[in-house]
Amino acid sequence: MSHSGASGVDPAVRVWDFGGYDQFSAEPFPESTELSARLRWFWEPTYYTRALGNIILTRIFGGRDTGYGVVLTGDTIEARLADVRERRNAYRASHPEAVRRVREIYDSASK
């Protein structure tokens, strides 16, 4: 049986963050407009493919570090947030067309 420490946090529980800007979530859209064109890693924004699910599970259960996924703790969260912000800014700078498209979609939905 696992017991909580003085902080009330169970040391056996790990919280993972698989969000942010990385080789998986920043996958470019297929050039094709065909309905059969698919992303490799995601079915839609919140549902990843089995291939990415396998990478996530391998990472969680001690597999090879692919650079994807970070264990969040009180000691790591600020660095993680700073890294996500830095990668977001880099993505915005290197993908101005994608940023413009998202802004247009947001603006049209906000009216």
Image: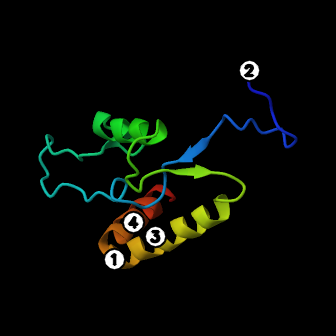
State the separation of the CA atoms marked 1 and 3. Answer: 10 Å
4 vs 25, nearest the viewer: 4
For image coordinates 32% across by 73% down, the residue present is: 95
Q: How is the image coloured?
A: rainbow
- Earlier in the chain: of badge 4 and badge 3, it is 3
State the separation of the CA atoms marked 2 and 3. Answer: 40 Å
Q: Which structural element holds mark 1?
A: helix
Q: Given contact means CB atoms under 8 Å apart, are the residues at marks 4 and 2 in contact?
A: no
Residue 95 against residue 19 in the figure, above or below: below
Q: Quadrant of residue 25?
A: bottom left
Q: Which structural element holds mark 3?
A: helix
Q: Which structural element holds mark 2?
A: loop
69 vs 88, nearest the viewer: 69
Q: Which residue is mark 1?
A: 94
Residue 83 against residue 54 in the figure, above or below: below
For image coordinates 31% across by 37% down, the residue present is: 49
Q: Which residue is mark 4?
A: 104
Closer to the eye: label 4 or 3: 3
Closer to the eye: label 1 or 3: 3
